[in-house]
Image (cartoon, helix red, strand yellow):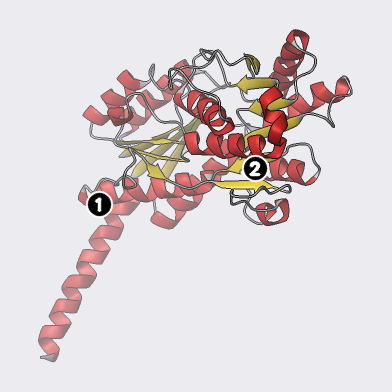
Amino acid sequence: MKLKFAFISAVAMGVLAATAAQAQDVGACLITKTDTNPFFVKMKEGARQGAEANGIDLQTFAGKIDGDVETQITAVESCIASGARGILITPSDSEALVPVVTQAREAGLLVIALDTPFEPADAVDATFATDNFKAGELIGQWAAARMGDDAANAKIALLDLNASEVSVDYLRNNGFLQGFGIDIKDPTDIGDEDDPRIVGNDVTNGNEEGGRTAMENLLQIDPEINLVYTINEPAAAGAYEALRAVGREKDVIIVSVDGGCPGVQNIAEGIIGATSMQFPLLMASKGIEAIRAWAVDGTKPENTPGLDFFNTGVELITDQPVSGIESLTSREGLAKCWG
């Protein structure tokens, strides 16, 4: 019996050693929209930690600006040529990148979208993301409850991402509108609503400078704007600066999505009223684990039941809680934030 047990143990150890060796031979790529946004900085950190823990050789790439499709296409082609087993990508354009990620999948790579879903979603093997519609809906619901009866007279500025209207952009924008109680027309389009409370939409490229310029533009249309939705917290910071320049920073509610530490600190300082926190480190680390599993035994990740992606979660952060909507304070948020 002892001899038999020793033989079985030896076989098991051999299998484990072979699996470990397989994992160490695995190459993976992370391709983000930019390498300056704190969200993508944290995503890269999560991917590197996951790669180190799983013995994976990780290459990282990023666009020059949000919307830089050509650099991302070149990065995917480089990953294919390098013999990588998988790609994690936050697409700058969720439709324009479909042909090149299809090429990667045909070459045997596992392709996982992070944060921004592809169109169609099954253009990639899996998506690890925040429920971006829910993230927008939460801040919309919060804003409506916070304004109370004044919500009927809201003057809303919508600060979006870019003219491409990628999935993450229209999902957050339309989620916010629905949460606030505004009928959305085409759920995959931005700006087709006819509610008179909407002053207008402008694009920010997801950065502070863009947020400031977009806010300035919309204030020219209506200087009495009292509610501002922003695609992310850098854009929110820019919007606040534009409002402060005209003495409106104390009487306008700003809401956003991200959950980065600077944004959560802005909640504490009263700059942002509420934000929906997402978890980029988790997206990336789960993505790396999925590539390892694919390389070892061909296993593909599964979606969250009822969704066409794996939901990495969202939390509402605010220091002005409202009845019926679960939220965390900025102090609690600072213990969970990133960046």
Q: Residue at x 51, y 31 (%)?
A: 175
Quadrant of residue 107 within the rendered picture:
top left
Residue occupied by mark 2: 260
Measured as percent of width and height from the top left, residue 15 is found at: 20, 65
Q: Amino acid at mark 1?
A: Val
Q: Looking at the rendering, in which quadrant would you find the C terminus? A: top right
- Under tag 2, what secondary structure? loop
Residue occupied by mark 1: 296
Quadrant of residue 97 within the rendered picture:
top left
Residue 193's label in the rendered image is none
Residue 235 can be seen, yes or no: no
Using the image as rendered, state which of residue 88 and residue 218 is in the foreground.
218
Q: Residue at x 21, y 51 (%)?
A: 297
- Under tag 1, what secondary structure? helix
Measured as percent of width and height from the top left, residue 241 is found at: 81, 25
**Label 2 neighbour load within 10 Å: few <14, some 14-19, many 20+:** many
Using the image as rendered, state which of residue 54 and residue 266 is in the foreground.
266
Q: Residue at x 28, y 35 (%)?
A: 109
Using the image as rendered, state which of residue 234 and residue 226 is in the foreground.
226
Measured as percent of width and height from the top left, residue 47 is found at: 48, 45
The residues bearing labels 1 and 2 have C-alpha atoms spaced at a distance of 34 Å
Quadrant of residue 55 within the rendered picture:
bottom left
Residue lying farthest bottom? 1
Using the image as rendered, state which of residue 107 and residue 240 is in the foreground.
240
Q: Looking at the rendering, in which quadrant would you find the N terminus? A: bottom left
Q: Residue at x 72, y 55 (%)?
A: 331
Q: Amino acid at mark 2?
A: Gly
Q: Of the residues under marks 1 and 2, which one precedes in the sequence?
A: 2
